[in-house]
Image: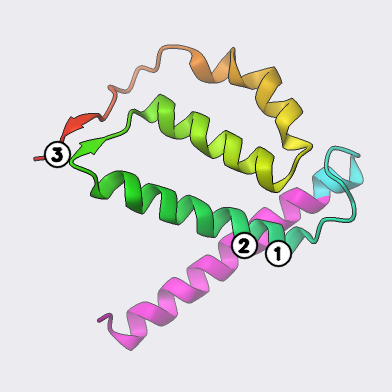
Amino acid sequence: MREPSAAQADAERLASQIDMAARNVAYAQRNGEVDPAVDARLVSAAFLGAFLELMAEAMSREVTPSRQYLLDTIWRLGASIIPSALSIWKHFGHSQFNRKSTVPEVSGPRK
C-alpha cells in the first residue's frame, strides 16, 4: 500500500505526462500526421498506461527482454493505438532504432 502523498504525487506526475503527450498528438494532428478524429488526451493516456505496464511486466521477469525488443514492442503498440504511427515506425524502425546502442543491453537473468 502506498502512502497517500505518494499516490497523489504519482497521479499529478501522470497527469502532467498525459498533458505533454496530448500536446504532441495535437501537434501531429495539426500537421496531418495523426487522424484528427483521435482524442489526443485519451490516446495519450492509453499509450502511457500501456507503456508503464509493459515496463513493469518486463522488469518483473526472470529474464528481462532486450532494449531492442522492448523498443520494437512499444513502437508496435503505438502504431496499434494511432494507426498513422505505423508509417513513422516503418520509416524509422529499421534505421534509427536498429543501430547498435552504446548502452549495453539489459537482458538475461535478474539478480
| Image location of residue 11, percent across then percent down | 48, 75
Q: Are marks 3 and 2 in contact (CB under 8 Å)?
A: no
Q: CA distance from mark 1 to mark 3?
A: 34 Å
Secondary structure state at the residue bearing disc 1: helix
Q: Which residue is mark 1?
A: 42
Instruction: Indicate yes or no whether the magenta region holds residue 11.
Output: yes
Q: Looking at the magenta stretch, what is its main secondary structure?
A: helix
Which amino acid lies under the numbered mark 1 shown in the image of this protein?
Leu
**Which image quadrant: the N terminus?**
bottom left
Residue depicted at x 52% and y 54%: 50
Secondary structure state at the residue bearing disc 2: helix
Q: Are marks 1 and 2 in contact (CB under 8 Å)?
A: yes
Query: What stretch of residues is rendered in magenta?
Result: 1-26
**Of the image marks 1 and 3, the number of the one nearer the N terminus:** 1
| Image location of residue 18, percent across then percent down | 62, 62
Q: CA distance from mark 1 to mark 2?
A: 5 Å
**Which image quadrant: the C terminus?**
top left
Left-right relation of 35 to 9? right
Q: Are marks 1 and 3 in contact (CB under 8 Å)?
A: no
Q: Which residue is mark 3?
A: 110
Looking at the image, is 64 positioned above or below residue 30? above
Which amino acid lies under the numbered mark 2 shown in the image of this protein?
Ala
Secondary structure state at the residue bearing disc 3: loop
